[in-house]
Image (cartoon, helix red, strand yellow):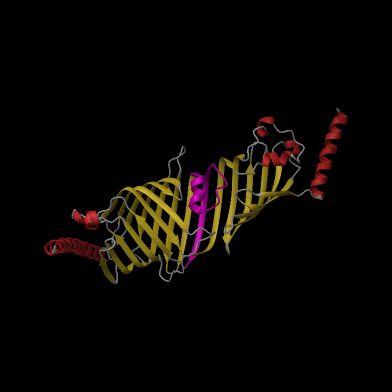
Amino acid sequence: MKKIAISLLIVLFAIFAFFYVQLQQAKSLLTEQLTKRDIQLETVSISLFPQPVISLEKVKYHAISAQKIEGKLPFISLVFGNPTIDEIQIQQARFTENALNSANIRMVFSDFALKQFLKKDLTFNGSNHIWVNLEKPIYGNTATFDFLFNKGNIALRQEGESLIQFDDVQFNQQKLGYIEIHADLTKPQKLAIGYIRPTCTTNCLAILKFSSYLQKSAVNFSGKNFPLTQLLALLNFPQTMTGTSDFNVQLAFANSELAQGKFDFNARDGELLGLNLLDMAAQYLPINYNSDLTASRNMNTPYERFESSLSFENHLLKVDKINLKTTALLAEGAGAIDLDNVQCDVNLTLRSTNEKYKKLALPIRFFDSCYSPQYKVNIDQNFRHQLKELIKEKLKLCHFI
């Protein structure tokens, strides 16, 4: 029995030594390649149980830093002498110096060999998943973002422009297609420009421009013929509309916190979800709408054009302007959206597209949840006066006939 026990211990020691040597080689390779790529760090450590892990402490790449990065390696990859990383966890990542907000990031890879660090470009195949959890939300109450892609390439350059490409992308469960980013993070002023091209029936494209100097950053995000479902997911806005939109978004940050924002949208050929303006208006306006428009009792409002301008300041999203055109209605208004609680408070004035009734304006206030708002029709003295005048005109016309 003693011989068996000793033999078993020798075998276990040999296995442990083999794995330890493999990890030491992986550690040396990683440290050497990080140094070549101008990535600074304080310490590198390894552990074997319960899973092989390489840990990097106080990592810095120009203005980008992380308190700790852990790379997890499956045992089987060490057995075959080709170490792979199946998961990376990044703690307290900051994207500018003295940033007041940080992120914890978790990445899961299908097939990422450690020897890729020997190459200039990092290539990703199979399903790859990234979760980003912000310490504080940028706005609203969502601090977690979900990024999934099936193919990727990162070409980091020590000088000049780096290229980042992802294909078959999903962001917060919305398909975004292909993303390409050109970035130069090596100079005092950081610059990046990204192109987002989802799969769509029109020639759709969004462009994101980022610049950062010292503690201030600016983002310009614009697009043409972009699907609203994907756009609202990107902006972390409530999913209250469909259609396609031209848009322009400008955001200003101080110490990684949003200071100001401006949003302009020009949408078309979609629906307002959870809201039937036509049914609502038909109860109060003396208009005989086409039965085809009201028969379906659809809970949504199809529209031809929707224009809006919004501004963000002090955690409140102000709706500065709304202009809406449907087949039978025109609407204009303004209001506010509390993104923390997804509560809307918007005042609209509805009119008929029929020239005979355009003078009659129906004021409605929408409030409560943005997904299923309550409403109150403001039948004030002005509306009653307009209605009386309309009836008088009709009576005069009947008398004349």
Whether the magenta-drawn stretch holds residue 61 is answered as: no
Name the residue: 88% across, 30% down. Answer: 399
Return the residue nearer the eye: 35 or 359. 35
Return the residue nearer the eye: 66 or 320. 66
The image quadrant where one finds the N terminus is bottom left
The image quadrant where one finds the C terminus is top right
Position of residue 271 in the picture relative to residue 211 (left or right): right
Locate residue 319, reporting x and y percent: 62, 54
User: Looking at the image, how many numbered discs can be counted on the residues?
Assistant: 0
Locate residue 367, reporting x and y percent: 67, 53
Whether the magenta-drawn stretch holds residue 235 is answered as: yes
* The quadrant where residue 51 appears: bottom left
State the extent of the magenta-drawn residues as a range.
225-254
Decide if residue 54 is in sight here. yes
Question: In the rendered image of this protein, does residue 150 appear above or below residue 39?
Answer: above
Locate residue 102, reporting x and y percent: 43, 66
Decide if residue 62 is in sight here. no
Farthest residue in the top direction? 401
Farthest residue in the right direction? 399
* The quadrant where residue 280 appears: top right
Question: In the rendered image of this protein, does residue 210 appear above or below residue 328?
Answer: below
Locate residue 306, reporting x and y percent: 60, 44
Farthest residue in the front direction? 1
